[in-house]
Amino acid sequence: MTEDQQPPKPIAWEPVTEPGYQDILMHRAEGIAKITINRPEVRNAFRPETVLELSDAFRRAHLDPQIGVIILTGAGELAFCSGGDQRIRGDAGYRDTAGAEHLNVLELQRQIRTLPKPVVAMVAGYAIGGGHVLHLICDLSIAAENARFGQTGPKVGSFDAGFGAGQMARTIGLKRAKEIWFLCRQYDAQEALAMGLVNTVVPLAELEATTVDWCRQMLRHSPTALRLLKAAFNADSDGLAGIQELAGNATGLFYTTAEAQEGRDAFLEKRAPDFGPFRRHS
Ligand SMILES: CC(C)(COP(=O)(O)OP(=O)(O)OC[C@H]1O[C@@H](n2cnc3c(N)ncnc32)[C@H](O)[C@@H]1OP(=O)(O)O)[C@@H](O)C(=O)NCCC(=O)NCCSC(=O)CCC(=O)c1ccccc1C(=O)O
Protein backbone atom coordinates (compact mmCIF):
# COMPACT_ATOMS: atom_id res chain seq x y z
CA MET A 1 0.00 0.00 0.00
CA THR A 2 1.11 3.57 -0.63
CA GLU A 3 1.42 6.15 2.16
CA ASP A 4 -2.24 7.19 1.81
CA GLN A 5 -3.34 3.51 1.88
CA GLN A 6 -4.63 3.52 -1.71
CA PRO A 7 -3.71 0.51 -3.90
CA PRO A 8 -0.64 1.51 -5.92
CA LYS A 9 -1.24 2.75 -9.46
CA PRO A 10 0.14 0.28 -12.06
CA ILE A 11 3.17 1.52 -13.93
CA ALA A 12 3.19 1.66 -17.76
CA TRP A 13 6.73 0.59 -18.71
CA GLU A 14 7.99 1.71 -22.11
CA PRO A 15 10.71 -0.46 -23.66
CA VAL A 16 13.97 1.27 -24.54
CA THR A 17 14.77 -0.11 -28.00
CA GLU A 18 18.08 1.67 -28.66
CA PRO A 19 20.81 0.46 -28.90
CA GLY A 20 19.24 -3.03 -29.16
CA TYR A 21 20.61 -5.23 -26.38
CA GLN A 22 21.03 -9.03 -26.63
CA ASP A 23 21.30 -10.06 -22.98
CA ILE A 24 19.34 -7.41 -21.12
CA LEU A 25 16.10 -5.45 -21.34
CA MET A 26 15.65 -1.80 -20.48
CA HIS A 27 12.36 -0.06 -19.68
CA ARG A 28 11.47 3.35 -18.38
CA ALA A 29 8.44 5.09 -16.91
CA GLU A 30 7.67 7.89 -14.44
CA GLY A 31 11.37 8.74 -13.93
CA ILE A 32 12.30 5.11 -13.18
CA ALA A 33 14.63 3.00 -15.36
CA LYS A 34 14.27 -0.77 -15.07
CA ILE A 35 17.23 -2.87 -16.22
CA THR A 36 16.60 -6.63 -16.50
CA ILE A 37 19.17 -9.38 -17.00
CA ASN A 38 17.42 -11.49 -19.61
CA ARG A 39 19.06 -14.93 -19.65
CA PRO A 40 16.48 -17.00 -17.75
CA GLU A 41 17.69 -20.26 -19.33
CA VAL A 42 20.84 -19.97 -17.17
CA ARG A 43 19.13 -18.36 -14.17
CA ASN A 44 20.30 -14.97 -15.50
CA ALA A 45 24.00 -15.79 -15.28
CA PHE A 46 26.11 -13.07 -16.88
CA ARG A 47 28.76 -13.32 -19.56
CA PRO A 48 31.17 -10.46 -20.42
CA GLU A 49 28.75 -9.14 -23.05
CA THR A 50 25.93 -9.06 -20.47
CA VAL A 51 28.11 -6.97 -18.20
CA LEU A 52 29.00 -4.55 -21.02
CA GLU A 53 25.32 -4.13 -21.86
CA LEU A 54 24.42 -3.59 -18.19
CA SER A 55 27.13 -0.98 -17.96
CA ASP A 56 25.81 0.79 -21.06
CA ALA A 57 22.24 0.77 -19.72
CA PHE A 58 23.36 2.13 -16.33
CA ARG A 59 25.35 4.87 -18.09
CA ARG A 60 22.29 5.87 -20.10
CA ALA A 61 20.11 5.93 -16.97
CA HIS A 62 22.80 7.96 -15.18
CA LEU A 63 22.97 10.59 -17.92
CA ASP A 64 19.21 10.77 -18.56
CA PRO A 65 17.90 13.83 -16.68
CA GLN A 66 14.39 12.33 -16.69
CA ILE A 67 15.54 9.32 -14.65
CA GLY A 68 15.81 9.60 -10.87
CA VAL A 69 15.88 5.97 -9.69
CA ILE A 70 17.04 2.70 -11.27
CA ILE A 71 15.79 -0.85 -10.69
CA LEU A 72 18.05 -3.85 -11.39
CA THR A 73 16.31 -7.20 -11.74
CA GLY A 74 16.34 -10.58 -13.50
CA ALA A 75 13.91 -12.00 -16.03
CA GLY A 76 11.34 -14.47 -14.73
CA GLU A 77 10.51 -15.57 -11.23
CA LEU A 78 13.29 -18.12 -10.71
CA ALA A 79 16.38 -15.95 -10.48
CA PHE A 80 17.68 -12.43 -10.04
CA CYS A 81 21.14 -13.58 -11.18
CA SER A 82 23.26 -16.71 -10.71
CA GLY A 83 26.64 -15.01 -11.19
CA GLY A 84 29.26 -15.60 -13.84
CA ASP A 85 28.24 -17.96 -16.67
CA GLN A 86 30.28 -21.07 -15.84
CA ARG A 87 29.88 -22.45 -19.37
CA ILE A 88 32.18 -19.78 -20.80
CA ARG A 89 34.59 -19.59 -17.88
CA GLY A 90 38.12 -19.93 -19.20
CA ASP A 91 41.33 -20.40 -17.23
CA ALA A 92 41.74 -16.68 -16.45
CA GLY A 93 38.25 -15.20 -16.57
CA TYR A 94 35.02 -15.30 -18.56
CA ARG A 95 35.50 -15.58 -22.34
CA ASP A 96 33.82 -13.09 -24.63
CA THR A 97 32.79 -14.07 -28.16
CA ALA A 98 36.24 -13.00 -29.43
CA GLY A 99 37.97 -15.31 -26.93
CA ALA A 100 39.34 -12.63 -24.55
CA GLU A 101 38.93 -13.43 -20.84
CA HIS A 102 37.39 -10.92 -18.44
CA LEU A 103 36.40 -10.28 -14.85
CA ASN A 104 34.50 -7.19 -15.91
CA VAL A 105 31.67 -7.38 -13.38
CA LEU A 106 34.04 -5.63 -10.98
CA GLU A 107 33.82 -2.46 -13.09
CA LEU A 108 30.03 -2.73 -13.08
CA GLN A 109 30.05 -2.99 -9.28
CA ARG A 110 32.01 0.28 -9.04
CA GLN A 111 29.68 1.92 -11.55
CA ILE A 112 26.55 1.02 -9.55
CA ARG A 113 28.23 2.06 -6.31
CA THR A 114 29.22 5.51 -7.57
CA LEU A 115 26.23 6.21 -9.82
CA PRO A 116 24.65 9.30 -8.24
CA LYS A 117 21.07 7.98 -8.28
CA PRO A 118 19.55 5.29 -6.04
CA VAL A 119 19.74 1.76 -7.47
CA VAL A 120 17.23 -0.80 -6.16
CA ALA A 121 17.68 -4.57 -6.56
CA MET A 122 14.33 -6.28 -7.17
CA VAL A 123 15.01 -9.92 -6.30
CA ALA A 124 12.83 -12.92 -7.15
CA GLY A 125 14.37 -16.38 -6.91
CA TYR A 126 18.10 -16.93 -6.69
CA ALA A 127 20.68 -14.22 -6.09
CA ILE A 128 23.78 -16.39 -6.05
CA GLY A 129 27.54 -15.96 -6.49
CA GLY A 130 28.40 -12.84 -8.48
CA GLY A 131 24.64 -12.29 -8.73
CA HIS A 132 24.46 -12.06 -4.96
CA VAL A 133 27.20 -9.42 -4.98
CA LEU A 134 25.23 -7.44 -7.56
CA HIS A 135 22.20 -7.15 -5.24
CA LEU A 136 24.53 -6.33 -2.35
CA ILE A 137 26.11 -3.45 -4.24
CA CYS A 138 22.69 -1.92 -5.00
CA ASP A 139 21.52 0.73 -2.54
CA LEU A 140 18.34 -1.09 -1.53
CA SER A 141 17.17 -4.70 -2.00
CA ILE A 142 13.54 -5.73 -2.16
CA ALA A 143 13.02 -9.49 -2.04
CA ALA A 144 10.14 -11.70 -3.02
CA GLU A 145 9.20 -14.48 -0.60
CA ASN A 146 10.80 -17.01 -3.00
CA ALA A 147 14.18 -15.26 -3.02
CA ARG A 148 17.28 -17.25 -2.03
CA PHE A 149 20.67 -15.76 -1.34
CA GLY A 150 24.20 -17.10 -1.12
CA GLN A 151 27.77 -17.24 -2.31
CA THR A 152 29.24 -20.29 -4.05
CA GLY A 153 32.76 -19.07 -4.81
CA PRO A 154 34.76 -21.43 -2.59
CA LYS A 155 32.71 -24.34 -4.00
CA VAL A 156 33.26 -23.47 -7.66
CA GLY A 157 36.80 -22.10 -7.46
CA SER A 158 36.11 -18.37 -7.27
CA PHE A 159 35.81 -15.54 -4.74
CA ASP A 160 35.07 -11.84 -4.61
CA ALA A 161 37.35 -10.43 -1.95
CA GLY A 162 36.57 -6.83 -2.93
CA PHE A 163 33.10 -5.39 -2.43
CA GLY A 164 31.76 -8.94 -2.30
CA ALA A 165 33.51 -9.45 1.03
CA GLY A 166 33.96 -5.90 2.35
CA GLN A 167 30.54 -4.52 1.50
CA MET A 168 28.91 -7.66 2.83
CA ALA A 169 30.73 -7.31 6.16
CA ARG A 170 29.67 -3.65 6.39
CA THR A 171 26.09 -4.63 5.63
CA ILE A 172 25.53 -7.63 7.91
CA GLY A 173 28.63 -7.80 10.12
CA LEU A 174 31.87 -9.75 9.91
CA LYS A 175 30.74 -13.03 11.48
CA ARG A 176 27.73 -13.42 9.20
CA ALA A 177 29.73 -12.37 6.11
CA LYS A 178 32.39 -14.96 6.88
CA GLU A 179 29.70 -17.60 7.42
CA ILE A 180 28.14 -16.86 4.04
CA TRP A 181 31.47 -17.02 2.24
CA PHE A 182 33.06 -19.92 4.14
CA LEU A 183 30.04 -22.25 4.29
CA CYS A 184 28.44 -21.44 0.91
CA ARG A 185 24.95 -22.09 2.33
CA GLN A 186 21.77 -20.65 0.89
CA TYR A 187 19.48 -18.35 2.91
CA ASP A 188 15.79 -17.75 2.32
CA ALA A 189 14.21 -14.31 2.15
CA GLN A 190 13.22 -14.17 5.83
CA GLU A 191 16.72 -15.17 6.94
CA ALA A 192 18.14 -12.50 4.63
CA LEU A 193 15.79 -9.91 6.14
CA ALA A 194 16.72 -10.93 9.68
CA MET A 195 20.42 -10.37 8.98
CA GLY A 196 19.88 -7.03 7.20
CA LEU A 197 20.85 -8.33 3.78
CA VAL A 198 17.59 -7.02 2.25
CA ASN A 199 15.29 -4.14 3.15
CA THR A 200 11.95 -5.90 2.94
CA VAL A 201 10.28 -9.14 1.85
CA VAL A 202 6.98 -9.18 -0.02
CA PRO A 203 4.82 -11.80 -1.75
CA LEU A 204 6.11 -12.49 -5.26
CA ALA A 205 2.91 -11.08 -6.79
CA GLU A 206 3.60 -7.74 -5.06
CA LEU A 207 7.32 -7.51 -5.82
CA GLU A 208 7.21 -5.06 -8.68
CA ALA A 209 4.40 -2.92 -7.23
CA THR A 210 6.28 -2.57 -3.94
CA THR A 211 9.56 -1.78 -5.70
CA VAL A 212 7.87 0.85 -7.85
CA ASP A 213 6.18 2.30 -4.75
CA TRP A 214 9.56 2.66 -3.01
CA CYS A 215 10.98 4.27 -6.18
CA ARG A 216 8.07 6.70 -6.37
CA GLN A 217 8.69 7.69 -2.76
CA MET A 218 12.36 8.42 -3.51
CA LEU A 219 11.39 10.36 -6.63
CA ARG A 220 9.39 12.75 -4.41
CA HIS A 221 12.59 13.60 -2.51
CA SER A 222 15.43 15.98 -3.34
CA PRO A 223 17.70 14.32 -5.94
CA THR A 224 20.65 16.36 -4.69
CA ALA A 225 20.09 15.21 -1.11
CA LEU A 226 19.90 11.57 -2.24
CA ARG A 227 22.99 12.00 -4.41
CA LEU A 228 25.07 13.50 -1.59
CA LEU A 229 23.85 10.89 0.89
CA LYS A 230 24.81 8.06 -1.46
CA ALA A 231 28.29 9.57 -1.90
CA ALA A 232 28.58 10.04 1.87
CA PHE A 233 27.74 6.38 2.56
CA ASN A 234 30.73 5.42 0.37
CA ALA A 235 33.17 8.10 1.47
CA ASP A 236 34.72 6.64 4.61
CA SER A 237 35.34 3.20 3.13
CA ASP A 238 36.54 4.44 -0.28
CA GLY A 239 39.48 6.54 0.94
CA LEU A 240 40.66 9.22 -1.47
CA ALA A 241 38.29 7.92 -4.17
CA GLY A 242 35.42 8.41 -1.70
CA ILE A 243 36.58 11.95 -0.95
CA GLN A 244 36.86 12.56 -4.70
CA GLU A 245 33.24 11.47 -5.12
CA LEU A 246 32.01 13.78 -2.35
CA ALA A 247 34.28 16.62 -3.47
CA GLY A 248 33.09 16.28 -7.06
CA ASN A 249 29.56 16.83 -5.81
CA ALA A 250 30.73 19.91 -3.89
CA THR A 251 32.37 21.25 -7.08
CA GLY A 252 29.16 20.59 -9.04
CA LEU A 253 27.14 22.55 -6.49
CA PHE A 254 29.79 25.34 -6.38
CA TYR A 255 29.51 25.74 -10.17
CA THR A 256 25.88 26.76 -9.71
CA THR A 257 26.88 29.76 -7.53
CA ALA A 258 27.46 33.36 -8.64
CA GLU A 259 30.93 33.16 -7.07
CA ALA A 260 32.10 30.34 -9.34
CA GLN A 261 30.40 31.92 -12.33
CA GLU A 262 32.26 35.20 -11.67
CA GLY A 263 35.54 33.28 -12.10
CA ARG A 264 34.36 31.78 -15.39
CA ASP A 265 32.93 35.07 -16.70
CA ALA A 266 36.04 37.07 -15.80
CA PHE A 267 38.21 34.62 -17.73
CA LEU A 268 35.97 34.75 -20.80
CA GLU A 269 35.70 38.55 -20.60
CA LYS A 270 39.52 38.87 -20.18
CA ARG A 271 39.26 40.87 -16.93
CA ALA A 272 40.31 40.36 -13.30
CA PRO A 273 37.67 38.48 -11.29
CA ASP A 274 35.88 40.35 -8.48
CA PHE A 275 35.30 37.88 -5.66
CA GLY A 276 34.77 40.73 -3.15
CA PRO A 277 30.99 40.24 -2.80
CA PHE A 278 31.52 36.61 -1.80
CA ARG A 279 33.78 37.04 1.24
CA ARG A 280 32.34 35.81 4.49
CA HIS A 281 33.61 35.26 7.97
CA SER A 282 31.88 32.06 9.16
C1 LIG B 1 21.30 -20.80 -9.26
C2 LIG B 1 21.02 -22.24 -8.88
C3 LIG B 1 21.01 -22.41 -7.37
C4 LIG B 1 19.63 -22.58 -9.45
O1 LIG B 1 19.32 -23.94 -9.19
P1 LIG B 1 18.06 -24.60 -9.96
O2 LIG B 1 16.88 -23.71 -9.86
O3 LIG B 1 17.94 -25.98 -9.42
O4 LIG B 1 18.44 -24.61 -11.48
P2 LIG B 1 19.56 -25.45 -12.24
O5 LIG B 1 18.94 -26.65 -12.83
O6 LIG B 1 20.77 -25.62 -11.40
O7 LIG B 1 19.92 -24.40 -13.39
C5 LIG B 1 19.10 -24.23 -14.52
C6 LIG B 1 20.00 -24.11 -15.72
O8 LIG B 1 20.79 -22.95 -15.57
C7 LIG B 1 22.17 -23.28 -15.64
N1 LIG B 1 22.91 -22.38 -14.77
C8 LIG B 1 22.58 -21.95 -13.56
N2 LIG B 1 23.50 -21.12 -13.07
C9 LIG B 1 24.46 -21.02 -14.02
C10 LIG B 1 25.69 -20.31 -14.11
N3 LIG B 1 26.12 -19.50 -13.12
N4 LIG B 1 26.41 -20.45 -15.22
C11 LIG B 1 25.99 -21.23 -16.24
N5 LIG B 1 24.84 -21.94 -16.22
C12 LIG B 1 24.08 -21.82 -15.12
C13 LIG B 1 22.24 -24.71 -15.16
O9 LIG B 1 23.43 -25.32 -15.57
C14 LIG B 1 20.98 -25.28 -15.81
O10 LIG B 1 21.25 -25.49 -17.19
P3 LIG B 1 20.81 -26.86 -17.91
O11 LIG B 1 21.30 -26.70 -19.30
O12 LIG B 1 19.31 -26.84 -17.80
O13 LIG B 1 21.44 -27.96 -17.12
C15 LIG B 1 22.06 -23.19 -9.49
O14 LIG B 1 21.88 -23.23 -10.88
C16 LIG B 1 23.46 -22.81 -9.21
O15 LIG B 1 23.96 -23.07 -8.12
N6 LIG B 1 24.13 -22.17 -10.18
C17 LIG B 1 25.53 -21.88 -10.12
C18 LIG B 1 25.79 -20.70 -9.23
C19 LIG B 1 27.26 -20.37 -9.26
O16 LIG B 1 28.07 -21.10 -8.75
N7 LIG B 1 27.60 -19.22 -9.90
C20 LIG B 1 28.95 -18.82 -10.12
C21 LIG B 1 29.53 -18.21 -8.89
S1 LIG B 1 31.14 -17.59 -9.18
C22 LIG B 1 30.80 -16.07 -9.80
O17 LIG B 1 29.72 -15.65 -10.01
C23 LIG B 1 32.05 -15.32 -10.03
C24 LIG B 1 31.95 -14.32 -11.09
C25 LIG B 1 32.27 -12.96 -10.61
O18 LIG B 1 31.34 -12.26 -10.45
C26 LIG B 1 33.61 -12.46 -10.30
C27 LIG B 1 34.15 -12.69 -9.05
C28 LIG B 1 35.35 -12.16 -8.70
C29 LIG B 1 36.02 -11.36 -9.61
C30 LIG B 1 35.47 -11.09 -10.86
C31 LIG B 1 34.27 -11.66 -11.22
C32 LIG B 1 33.74 -11.43 -12.59
O19 LIG B 1 33.98 -10.36 -13.15
O20 LIG B 1 33.11 -12.33 -13.18
Image (cartoon, helix red, strand yellow):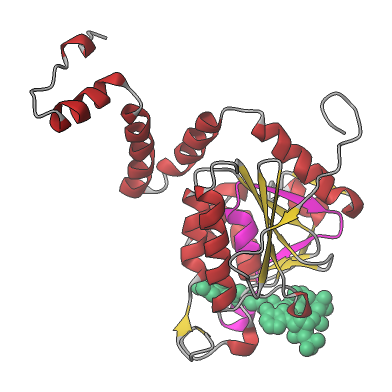
In the image, the segment drawn in magenta is: 132-157
The foreground one among 43 and 36 is 36
| Magenta stretch: includes residue 138 | yes
Q: Is residue 255 visible?
A: yes
Residue at coordinates 74% horizontally, 79% vertically from top-left?
Answer: 42
Q: Position of residue 200 (x, y in %)?
A: 77, 44
Q: Is residue 166 visible?
A: no
**Horizontal and vertical percent position of residue 76:** 82, 67
Q: Quadrant of residue 272?
A: top left
In this rendering, the answer to whether 223 lies above or below 181 is: above
Residue 212 screen position, x and y as percent: 76, 43
Image-quadrant location for residue 19:
bottom right
In the rendered view, does 225 fall on the left or right side of 190? left
Seen from the viewer's position, the closer of residues 250 and 28 is: 28
Query: Count of labels shown?
Result: 0
Quick check: 202 above or below 179? above
Residue at the spot 61% in from the left edge and 61% down from the top edge? 134
Residue at screen point 81% across, 43% down: 210
Of the 4 image quadrants, the one containing the N terminus is top right
Q: Is residue 203 magenta?
A: no
Task: Tell me if 98 is positioned left or right of 53 in this view.
Answer: left
- Extreme residue toward the front, this view: 269
- Give how far across and how far down residue 234 sits, in percent: 46, 44
Q: Residue at x 69, y 46 (%)?
A: 196
Q: Is residue 230 left or right of residue 87?
A: left
* Ligand 1 image position (quadrant): bottom right
Q: Where the C terminus falls, by quadrant? A: top left
Q: Is residue 60 left or right of residue 33?
A: left
Q: Nearer the viewer, residue 70 or 140?
A: 70
